[in-house]
Image (cartoon, rainbow, N blue to C red):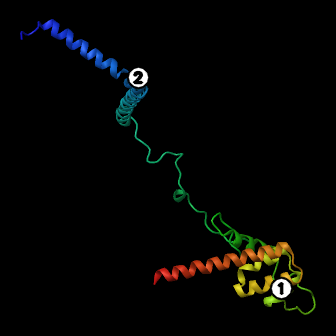
Amino acid sequence: MKQLPFPVRVAAGLAVTTAERVRDLPKQLTELPVTVASQVLQASMRVQQHVTELAIKGDDALSSLRPAEEAPSWATFDEDLEEPPSTPAPNGHRPATAFDDPWGAEERALAEEHTEGEFDSPGAPSAGPAGVTDYDSLTLPQLRARLRRYTLTQLEELLAYERDHANRPSFTGMLTRRIGNVRAEQAEGDSEDTTER
């Protein structure tokens, strides 16, 4: 068979290519938004990259004219701040800082306001539950200031006494929370001892 002229062969190839493209057109149309979006993102990233490269070159050029600061004046970190010298307060207690335990701060504040036994009755002090003198006459802040001194057994005894006598909700709630905290601290200490072995 004789070969057809070159232009006819090219025209046939063009027709077949067009038919293939038309057949693939629906698939290409669904991919078109994704393709366009990715090309736009690539172009914007290239522009950003060029702008950044220009800024770096500009910084290099300008740094020879003006020395750079070691640390900008606005950049301060906790470790950079100088701690003020710890001066004792007039009553002999050190002032509370932001990092102190809130319970400790409250205890110190209450201790500064009231001296030990200030509210005791003038007669012989009556021994209360867990060895707490005049427990029934203590106010909630006074008891709260002393809570850290008591053992778990003493706290449980105070809670039982409170429930059996005055059963004040604020007192029972505070004692219950403190007992829970002590138990959690003990459990945490026990788990640390177990892991160390």
Rendered residue at 75%/76% (across/down): 176
What residue does disc 1 label? 161
Q: Residue 169 carries which label?
A: none
How many residues crowd around disc 2 within 10 Å: few (fewer than 14), some, or many (20 or more)?
Answer: few
Task: Describe residue 20's horizontal placement relative to residue 117 as left or right.
Answer: left
- Please state which amino acid type lies under the numbered disc 1: Tyr
- Look at the numbered disc 1 and give the secondary structure of its residue: helix
Q: Which of marks 1 and 2 precedes in the sequence? A: 2
Q: Mark 2 points at which residue?
A: 29
Q: Is residue 117 visible to the viewer in this orientation of the structure?
A: no
Look at the picture and state if 43 lies above or below 112: above
Q: Which of 31 and 109 is in front in this view?
A: 31
Nearest the eye: 88 or 147:
147
Q: Residue at x 18, y 10 (%)?
A: 10
Residue 191 lies in quadrant: bottom right
Answer whether residue 57 is visible to the viewer in this image.
yes
Say which of 50 and 93 sits in front: 50
Relative placement, left or right, of 112 versus 42 is: right
Q: What element carries label 2?
A: helix
Residue 47 pos. (x, y %): 38, 27
Residue 177 drawn above or below residue 51: below
Q: Report how far apart the C-alphas of labels 2 and 1 lie in the structure.
A: 81 Å
Q: Quadrant of the N terminus?
A: top left
Give the number of the mark in front: 2 or 1.
2
**Quadrant, the C terminus:** bottom left
Q: Residue type at mark 2: give it.
A: Leu
Give x and y (percent) for residue 55. 39, 32
